[in-house]
Image (tube, rainbow, N blue to C red):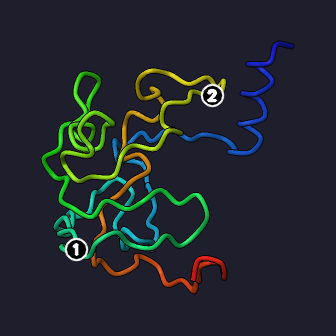
Amino acid sequence: MNKTVMLMMALLLVMGPVQAQSDGASLDTGTMKALRGTLSLDQDPAPERIRDPLKDQGIQDRQYMHQPPLIPHQVRSYEVDLKVNRCLSCHGWKNAASRNAPRVSVTHFEPRDGMTLSDISPRRYFCMQCHVPQTGARPLVENTFTPVESLR
């Protein structure tokens, strides 16, 4: 038996028989109490207002080893796509000193094979995959996290 057929058979065993609805009613998608509230899974909650960044807070301490630095300024209209990265207009090595901005780390010039490139590595080009703006937003879920002793 080929792998696809075996996978389909396993899924049928786990899911049970599929029943068609003849009355035209939609399938029950269920509800779940979660961060989205108790909305049905086929509904979207109204989005919250985007929080304003904390202003004039300076650079925040990191809470764990290898934590990417937080962004201490507004980035709402920043263009970052395949052709343009507005972050690099200040944080690129060419302009950082004149803009009084921290330079992009040398680690951002290294691809997976460890070689050093002459420009930002493609896997590090989209800054906001790791770096996020600082805000005064309350935590989404309660937590008791404390930084490691060496960072306090």
Q: Position of residue 111 (x, y in %)?
A: 57, 27
Quadrant location of residue 95?
top left
Image point (22%, 27%), residue name: 84
Give the structural element (helix, strand or loop) at label 1. Answer: loop
In the displayed structure image, the side of residue 47 where residue 19 appears, left or right: right
Q: Residue furthest front?
A: 97
Specify the farthest residue to the right. 1
Which quadrant of the structure image shows residue 139? bottom left
User: In the rendering, which numbered label is found on residue 141?
Assistant: none
Q: Quadrant of the N terminus?
A: top right
Say whether disc 1 or disc 2 marks the residue closer to the N-terminus.
1
Residue at numbered disc 2? 112
Around disc 1, counting alpha carbons within 10 Å, would you say few (fewer than 14), some (14 to 19), or many (20 or more)? some
Position of 113 compared to 97: left or right? right
Label 1 to label 2, Cα distance in Å? 34 Å
Q: Find numbered disc 2 in the image and state the secondary structure of the residue it sits on.
A: loop
Residue farthest top in this picture: 2
Local crowd size for mark 2, using a 10 Å CA cut-off: few (<14), some (14–19), many (≥20): few
Q: Out of 34 and 102, give the one closest to the viewer.
A: 102
The spot of residue 17 in percent (x, y) is 67, 41
Q: Which residue is mark 1?
A: 54
Q: Nearer the viewer, residue 120 or 130?
A: 120
Q: Residue at x 40, y 76 (%)?
A: 140
Asked if residue 5 is positioned above or below residue 37 in the image, the reply reads above
What amino acid type is highlighted by mark number 1? Leu
Instruction: Return the x and y of residue 114 as percentages of the image width and height.
Output: 65, 27
- Name which residue lies at 76% across and 27% down: 7
The kind of residue tagged 2 is Arg
